[in-house]
Image (cartoon, rainbow, N blue to C red):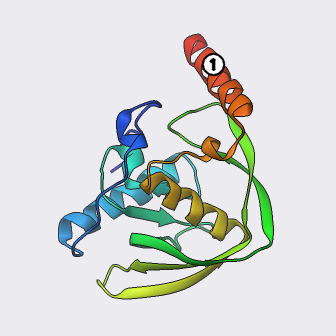
Amino acid sequence: MIRPCLPWPHQTLRRAAADVAEITPEIRTIWADMVDTMEAMPGYGLAAVQIGVPLRLAVVDCSTGRGQAVLMANPVVLHASIQLRPHEEASPNLPGVSATIERPRAVTVQFLNPQGALEERDFVELWATSAQHQIDHLAGKMYFDHLSAVKRSMLIAKANKLGRRG
């Protein structure tokens, strides 16, 4: 089921999400909805807080053919490369704007997988960018928080202006 994304500046987007204690049928349903929502955007990932679910759940799919979504509960970056990679980032929570953000080119992420097992996975390039973007969301952080105060203000003002037009 496709769920609506919360509009910025909804307070849920600024709060740290709660840990997931165990993988239940309800969690699997939320993940399925998140994948449907991500595919409908279209996007490379989605955090549960973006659709108003305050749990540490994320999905990432940067595969060319799609259908390779990595489902993560309680994801944490264990290691990050020193080499940075710039990428244009955006969010359905603040539509119509984007910004180039530099993030580590590769990360190792630990998370609970759909079977409830602790897993470590290496992500590189776009996969690493998307995983970090979703983990930021789960901590109450938006991609534009990586910008200077001036650039952040300009981006939000532009999004607000676009929102008034639509």
The image position of residue 159, as x and y in percent, is 62, 24
The image position of residue 71, as x and y in percent, is 42, 71
Q: Which residue is mark 1?
A: 162
Toward the top, the furthest residue is: 165
The image position of residue 133, as x and y in percent, is 57, 57
Secondary structure at badge 1 equals helix
Q: Nearer the viewer, residue 138 or 41?
A: 138
Quick check: can you spot residue 38?
A: yes
Quadrant where the C terminus sits is top right
- Position of 95 relative to 72 (above/below): above
| CA neighbours of label 1 inside 10 A, class few (<14), some (14 to 19), many (20+) | some
Q: Quadrant of residue 131?
A: bottom right
Q: Does 120 sit left or right of 22 as displayed?
A: right
Amino acid found under the numbered disc labelled 1: Leu
Q: Residue at x 64, y 30 (%)?
A: 96
Toward the left, the furthest residue is: 25
Q: Does 96 sit left or right of 83 as displayed?
A: left
Q: Residue at x 42, y 41 (%)?
A: 14
Q: Does 83 sit left or right of 51 as displayed?
A: right
- Position of 142 relative to 80 (above/below): above
- Position of 140 relative to 98 (above/below): below
Q: Residue at x 35, y 40 (%)?
A: 12
Q: How many marks?
A: 1
Q: Nearer the viewer, residue 145 or 90?
A: 145
The image position of residue 139, as x and y in percent, is 44, 55
Q: Residue at x 56, y 12 (%)?
A: 164
Q: Quadrant of residue 127?
A: bottom right
Quick check: can you spot residue 64?
A: no
